[in-house]
Image (cartoon, helix red, strand yellow):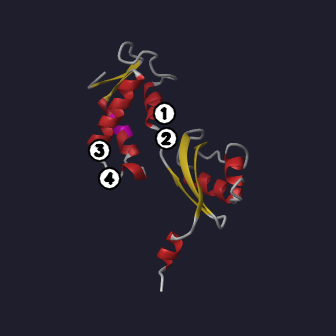
Amino acid sequence: MATLKEVVARRPVAATIRLTVPAGGARPAPPVGPALGQYRLNLMAFCKDFNARTQKYKPDTPMAVTITAYKDNTFEFIVKTPSVTWFLKQAAGVEFGSGRPGHVAATSLTLRHVYEIAKIKQTDFSCKHLSIEAICKSIIGTARSMGIDIVKDL
């Protein structure tokens, strides 16, 4: 006899939907409504659950969400932390990176900023297996590609 976990694992997947929704701002209007509506998913259930999970973040923080829609009109979703570029722009206080990264620096941040961003990103499911050092190196690479210099102390 199959266990409940095996039965749940065999549910046929209708689609995997990736959206960026503001924290606490999921509403049945676009982009959420049309994306979930075409698979006949319960919009209000998603909105209430998403808003409850993201209430600890500042409003309008862009949250990446991956929704797995099943053929029986049920769904599961994973909320990820905001992107590294968003965190870097917030920490630096700039709206855009440099137009010529490597040649013109937009601004500079300290290693402490990088470490704090890495601590937040380490809670993501996709980064759980990575060391804090590896996440920091990745963030430094992203900052470099945006034209943000990373310095020891300002």
Q: Position of residue 37 (x, y in %)?
A: 72, 53
Residue drawn at (42%, 50%) of the image: 124
Tell me the residue that label 1 is attached to: 86
Marked residue nearer the N-terminal end (4 or 1):
1
Q: Position of residue 59 (x, y in %)?
A: 59, 41
- Distance from label 2 to label 1 (Cα)? 7 Å
Give neighbour class at mark 4: few <14, some 14-19, many 20+ (Cα, 10 Å): few
Q: Is residue 115 magenta?
A: yes
Marked residue nearer the N-terminal end (4 or 2):
2
Q: Which mark is residue 129?
A: 4
The three-letter amino acid code for the residue at tag 2 is: Pro
Tell me the residue that label 2 is attached to: 82
- Distance from label 1 to label 3 (Cα)? 19 Å
Report helix, strand or loop for mark 3: helix
Report helix, strand or loop for mark 1: helix
- Distance from label 4 to label 2 (Cα)? 18 Å
Residue drawn at (50%, 70%) of the image: 9
Q: Please name whichever residue, 26 or 66, is drawn nearer the observer in this view of the structure.
A: 66
Q: Is residue 74 magenta?
A: no
- Distance from label 4 to label 3 (Cα)? 10 Å
Report helix, strand or loop for mark 2: loop
- Distance from label 4 to label 1 (Cα)? 22 Å
Q: Are marks 2 and 1 in contact (CB under 8 Å)?
A: yes
Q: Please name whichever residue, 153 or 34, is drawn nearer the observer in this view of the structure.
A: 34
The three-letter amino acid code for the residue at tag 4 is: His
> Which is closer to the viewer, label 4 or label 2?
4
Q: Are marks 4 and 3 in contact (CB under 8 Å)?
A: no
Tell me the residue that label 3 is attached to: 132
The residue sitting at the bottom extreme is: 1
Magenta-tinted stretch: 113-117
Report helix, strand or loop for mark 4: loop
Q: Are marks 4 and 1 in contact (CB under 8 Å)?
A: no
